[in-house]
């Protein structure tokens, strides 16, 4: 009897062990094998592209209203910029594909430039620029002309010139300016400009200043600048002759900055004043109006 009980007990324990291993095996292996072995996959971000970026005209007039059109791909945001002198100016958040009208300022010269940026969700971007040439409404008063459009038509004005030991003074009546051009330009500025503050009834010169024989003290507006502006008298010295009167024409280039000034001289040559008052030269034109 004890032997039978022992056999039954061993049988029960073996069955329990087998059953337990079967239960453990079923709970350890998932029914969906793919959930255990396949990694999580996310959709790739496609690179953004600017497909087209155009204007409705090949060349425009200052003051004209133009239409800009564009098409992009895979962009979550699109921005249109107006560039001035290569620097970002106004900007507009625009749809990925669309168009917009823009009125060119009447004072803009040479060209207009725009840039379009298409940005994806991962912040990568594609960009395109559009440069639209502009017609030039004015011509230069001399030739050969500079390679840019003048900002304005020539300003024709009464003028005067006077030569000094170390340079020259030029008066442009309609600007109410006196230009001073220095001969010693290697280590300092080459020219300066001052408002003409002399008025009728003011002293024309300083009687206490007596020039050496053969030289002259400048008078009126020239004399006021020569006497009262720092370093002008020292750099120019005495005048070599009395001032001469006539007519000039003035024009300037139309760059965003660093512009050149051109003055018609009384002998029909051209004073060329370089940007930033750095230097000057005298041009002998092929023709002059």
Image (spheres, rainbow, N blue to C red):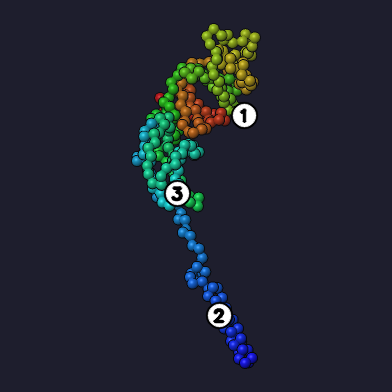
Give the vertical position of 176 relative to 112 (above or below): above
The number of callouts visible is: 3
Residue indicated by mark 2: 19
Q: Residue furthest left?
A: 56
Which one is nearer the viewer's eye here, 245 or 49?
49
Which one is nearer the viewer's eye here, 146 or 31?
31
Discs 1/3, front = 3
The numbered mark, 1 or 3, whose residue comes first in the sequence reads 3
Q: Secondary structure at mark 3?
A: loop
What is the spatial separation of the Cα atoms under label 3 and label 2, in whole angstroms? 59 Å
The answer to whether 147 appears left or right of 276 in the picture is: left
The answer to whether 266 appears left or right of 21 in the picture is: left
Image quadrant of residue 189?
top right
Give the vertical position of 167 relative to 67 (above or below): above
Q: Residue at x 47, y 37 (%)?
A: 90
Residue 234 x, y percent position in the rendering: 64, 20
Residue indicated by mark 1: 188
Disc 3: CA contacts within 10 A as few (<14), some (14-19) or many (>=20): some
Q: Residue at x 47, y 51 (%)?
A: 120
Residue 37 x, y percent position in the rendering: 51, 69
* Residue 76: numbered disc: 3
Q: Are marks 2 and 1 in contact (CB under 8 Å)?
A: no
Residue 22 x, y percent position in the rendering: 54, 79
* Residue 140: numbered disc: none
Disc 2: CA contacts within 10 A as few (<14), some (14-19) or many (>=20): few
The numbered mark, 2 or 1, whose residue comes first in the sequence reads 2
């Amino acid at each position: 009897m004890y032997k039978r009980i022992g056999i039954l007990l061993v049988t029960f324990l073996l069955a329990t062990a087998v059953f337990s291993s079967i239960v453990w095996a079923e709970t350890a292996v998932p029914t969906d094998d793919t959930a255990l072995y396949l990694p999580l996959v996310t959709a790739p971000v496609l690179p953004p592209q600017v497909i087209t970026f155009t204007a409705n005209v090949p060349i425009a007039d200052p003051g004209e209203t133009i239409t800009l059109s564009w098409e992009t791909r895979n962009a979550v945001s699109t921005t249109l910029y107006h560039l001035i002198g290569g620097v970002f100016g106004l900007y507009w958040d625009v749809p990925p594909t669309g168009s917009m009208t823009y009125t060119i300022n009447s004072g803009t010269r040479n060209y207009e430039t725009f840039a379009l940026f298409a940005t994806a969700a991962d912040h990568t971007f594609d960009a395109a620029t559009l440069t639209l040439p502009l017609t030039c409404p004015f011509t230069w008063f001399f030739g050969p002309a500079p390679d840019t459009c003048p900002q304005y038509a020539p300003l024709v004005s009464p003028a005067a010139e006077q030569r000094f030991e170390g340079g020259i003074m030029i008066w442009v009546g309609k600007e109410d300016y006196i230009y001073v051009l220095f001969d010693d330009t290697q280590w300092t500025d080459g020219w300066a400009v001052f408002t003409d503050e002399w008025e009728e009834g003011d002293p024309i010169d300083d009687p206490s200043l007596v020039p050496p024989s053969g030289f002259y003290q400048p008078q009126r507006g020239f004399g006021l600048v020569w006497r009262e502006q720092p370093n002008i008298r020292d750099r120019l010295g005495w005048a070599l002759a009395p001032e001469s009167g006539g007519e000039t024409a003035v024009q300037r280039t139309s760059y965003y900055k660093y512009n050149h000034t051109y003055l018609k001289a009384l002998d029909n040559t051209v004073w060329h004043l370089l940007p930033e008052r750095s230097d000057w030269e005298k041009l002998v034109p092929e023709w002059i109006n």
